[in-house]
Amino acid sequence: MSETIYLNQKETAKFIDDYYRSGSKNHRFDQLIKECKQSVIRSIITPFGLGRFMAIYDQVGANVDTIHNARKGIYATQAEKEKYKKNEKYNSDIYHKDPNFININKELSRQKKAGLAVDYLTGEKIIQNEKTDLDHIVSAYEIHNDAGRILAEVEGTKLANNKENLKLTQSSLNRSKRALSMEEFLKRRDKRLEAIEKLEQKRSLNSNELNELEKLKKQLKIDDEKALEADKKAREHINSIIEKEYYTSAKFAQNVAQSSAIEGAKMGIQQAFGLILVDFFSVLLDEIVDIYKNGFYNNFEGEGFFYTLKERIKLVASKVAERIKDKWSIIVSSFGDGFLSGVISNLTTTAINIFVTTSSRIVRVIREGIFSFFKAIKILLFPPDGMSLKDAWHEAKKLFVAGCITGLGIFIEQSLEAFLVSLGLGMFSSVITSVFVGVLTGIAIAVAMYYMDMSRKSLSQIRYEEIKALCMEKIPILQAKRKELTIMITQIHQERLFAIDAFLENFHQARAENDSEAIYVSLNSLSKLYQKEIKCKNKEDVIDKLCQGKGLLEW
């Protein structure tokens, strides 16, 4: 019977240390290499393989049309781009005969007669007999051709003819400004100031020159600060109407929903299919290593090349199928995580493009970054059973770092690809950059994760966790073996009990009949059960042996 050995804390620490010393001296280095291999495979396949393939459809300005992008001539959909091209030609009468324009003009004319009107460009009061015009601060022509307005499907007259955009000013100033923006008008005026000096230096001026000089002097009276402030308020008012109309419209909501669903499906497929491909290539590499170490025909001696190849392919397929079966729930969960992160990344890029136009590369970085961010938040909010908040935060930080490294890798990939194209290697640039940058990124992630783990834990804690993991791996196997042995022992025990019952019945019957031969046979059946040779041959031997010593039979 084996003896149970108990170790105190010091002896346990010594045992663990001896265990590591007696094993591979490069155990932790081997672990790092193993993690690097898996990380490199994941990086090449997921962000730089499938991710690059999915990014083929990424475009500048992301997947949803925004007012900001439309005004820069950037469209996510061809339909909106065509709608802008087919915009009706500007017609001044539509704007100047609009009821709102007429009503506001009447109201300001009454103020002018009452001596209450002020020139919005100069800040001076307008006298009754002064020639004035009702000016569109933001010109009707600019509003009519505004890509943002066309995208939002807002009537130009509604934007142009409102109190914020219609103000009185001197007729000469209005006609000098024409359809220019306020900034362009003031810049043009500043360039023409030299003309005033030239005209004033002349001894005599003709009627045209006198008119030009008078116009220029009136423009000198413009208060730039007031003019720009009026322009700012008018534009803010116009933009607020356009943005409210578009970003609360069913069209925008539908576009966001459709593009989010597509992006979610793309990211979900990328993550789920990526897991399957990682397992496939891991098994394939292991098979290649086996061929290198043990030969192509290992375990298939005497078989032909094609038969061996077929069997090895079957072996790889069966191993991959077994892995997929074991982690099917993880694959489904990964698709769900990818789908949600894809939706979030699409909403994020859409929100960004409301203010700033993103490049196609930035869209890809956001997509990959959001996935890491989503997983980090998920592990913080819903940590696995048995994981403390401290450990969850550590794992979340690792995911953040991995996302940052992946994003940096995507930028490096872009620069490297441009460099290879400049060398005339454009045909192979995408493959080279995907593999090379994928390898570098995978190694960087593995080393960063390893360093974060090493810096966080003491050597004894790391060893404890490794042995714990080893135990968790082996204990189920031992438990299965124990269950198997228990069943076997129970069966043997039951068989022996049945045999003993039969022996006792036969023995009592033989003894009652005083049959020496039958007594011997029954005793011999018991001896065979325990694989012992009984020394009792007849009734007299039995009685003699039972009567001696402690009354036990000799075997």
Image (cartoon, grey):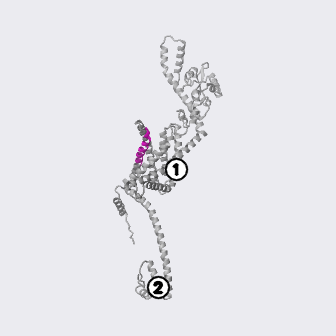
Relative image position of residue 9 (x, y in whole percent): 37, 63
Whether residue 178 sits left or right of residue 42 in the image: it is right
Residue density around tag 2, few if under 14, some if 14–19, many if 20 or more, within 10 Å: many
Rendered position, 147 above or below 328:
above
Instruction: Give the residue at mark 2.
Output: 519
Image quadrant occupied by the C terminus: bottom left
Q: Could you tell me the amino acid type at mark 2?
A: Ile
Q: Quadrant of the N terminus?
A: bottom left
Foreground residue, 139 or 117?
A: 139
Secondary element under disc 1, as helix, strand or loop, is helix
Tag 1: amino acid: Phe
Mark 2: secondary structure: helix
Q: Position of residue 17 (x, y in %)?
A: 35, 60
Residue 188 magenta: no
Front-most of 504 and 143? 504
Q: Main secondary structure of the magenta part?
A: helix
The residue tagged 1 is 335
Foreground: disc 2 or disc 1: 2
301 left or right, relative to 138: left
Can residue 51 be seen here? The reply is yes
Q: Nearer the viewer, residue 193 or 56?
A: 56
Magenta residues (range): 426-445
Question: In this view of the protein, which residue sits in the foreground, 373 or 205?
Answer: 373
**Residue 294 on image: x %, y %:** 38, 56
Real-space CA distance between mark 2 and mark 1, rounded to the nearest whole angstrom: 75 Å
